[in-house]
Image: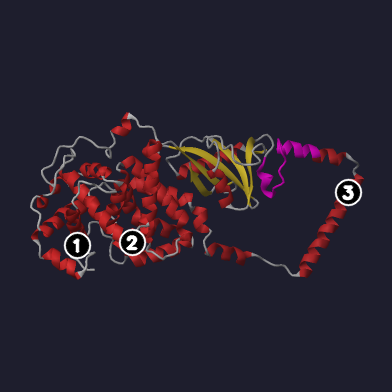
Amino acid sequence: MTDPTRDPGQDRLDELASAYLDGEVTGDERARVENDPQLQARVERLRAVAEAVGGGFTPLSDEDATMQRRRARLAGEDVVLAGPVAPAVRRDRRVWLPPAAVAAAVLVILALVGVLLIAAAGTGGGSADTASAGKAETAGGAATDTPSSASAAVGGTTLRELGSFADNAALRRTLEQLADVTTLAGAYQSDESTTRVKAAEVQRCDTTVRAAQSDLGDRLAFAGAEIGGRRVLVFSHPVEGSAGGTAKTQLTAVDMETCQPLFAVIR
Amino acid sequence: VTGPARDPPGTLAPGVAEGDDDLVSRARAGDERALDDLLRRHQDRIHGVCRRLVGNEADALDATQEALISIVRGLPRFDGRSSFSTWAYRIATNAALDELRRRARRPVSSLDDARPGRREPVQPGPSVSQAVGDRLDVDAALAEVPLEFRAPVVLRDLCQLDYAEIAEVLDIPPGTVRSRISRGRAALAERLADPEGNPAPPPDRRNPRP
């Protein structure tokens, strides 16, 4: 960017004075500035400008500062925890059974299956009907075979399923791409899949999330997901008083059993 | 290079650099308290960068929030080649630039026109040193300085980065940093001395030395 009205000679003097102010001059340049009263005057003029830029603004209020840090920690929680320490801990927790123990366990399971089959043959064909009825009643839509789907309840609230994810980051990416954050719809493959869950469980986790973060408004939507076999609830809440007047929505993933937040995405 | 000793406003306390390294290590290992301390330590300066670059508080708050989130999410990838503060200011600068781009795409409303960062009618001040005491004067004047000059001035005068660090943050040569800071300060001085925008050469220009 070149300003034709500027005098290149004066620009060089300004640059020298400015660099002197910052301690970014050679010994010769420094001597020149210190021996020239007019250059010293330029330095003082620029010093006033530099001090104005460096100060004078109002720092963040404690409330704003605390809220911003909390949101940042929540938004990045899974990323930070996925650092170098966490995987090592997980590996240490893996337990390997000796081959003999595995073989014994297989034999016990086979024996139990055999006993159940014999018992079923003795009671006639009615059990098949009972099993299929139970499945339909529990699913209330597409069946789910996740281990923790035990929390699904007959007559509960319909829970839209976001799908199964390998880890928090995978679910986060999906949430970051959702087309509609107010209904939690639009970016996942199994958006028609639903299950049922006790309304009280949804409410309990929603209350926990909002108790931890006072600037969240009334819940807009919620959905279910599975991360590595763990059941997760995802809530959509408006962020009240969003900075800049821009309405924002926070998507919070929580463990369905404990209601503890796993991470959040602000859209 | 040498120069006069300078006591910059808002300088971080001695020993902060070592403290940052410890906090970064603990935060990366999942220590939430360390992460909070790290963010708390730099939050005001990050907010200051955003405030000075975007020119108004509302957009600065948005940019600050985005910067903090980016810092937390990027922490596992922070390689320590630069100091944490330099890395954080780079993120803050980028967040502020993103905010300015978003603002440029927003339709202009009457409310936008009333923001402090916009040019507001400010009474001409008789001197730079009197005008600089007014925060609105500084923000309004900075908003009129081209961004390529504004950013290095803010990183130098607010964050106290040296020219090499500013060059790294802005990805420009150190020599360019020197000239841009000079031109940014000169433009700022003229605007602070005469906020109406009338040409007002500094006193020493009326009697240039040969």
Q: In what quadrant of the picture does the C terminus of chain B appear?
A: bottom left
Secondary structure mainly formed by the magenta segment: helix
The quadrant in which residue A222 appears is top right
Residue A20 has which mark? 1
Labelled pair 3, 1 in contact (Cβ < 8 Å): no
- Residue A102 in the image, given as x and y percentages of width and height: 77, 65
Element carrying mark 1 = helix
Element carrying mark 3 = helix
Q: Is residue B37 visible?
A: no
Distance from label 3 to label 1 (Cα)? 94 Å
The amino acid at mark 1 is Tyr
Distance from label 2 to label 1 (Cα)? 17 Å
What stretch of residues is rendered in magenta?
Answer: A132-152
Q: Residues within 10 Å of mark 2 (few under 14, many from 20)?
A: many
Q: In what quadrant of the picture does the N terminus of chain B appear?
A: bottom left
B70 in relation to B79, above or below:
above
How many marks the image carries: the answer is 3
The amino acid at mark 3 is Ala
Q: Which residue is mark 2?
A: B165
- Residues B188 and A243: in front is B188
Q: Which residue is mark 3?
A: A119
Q: Residue at x 83, y 62 (%)?
A: A107
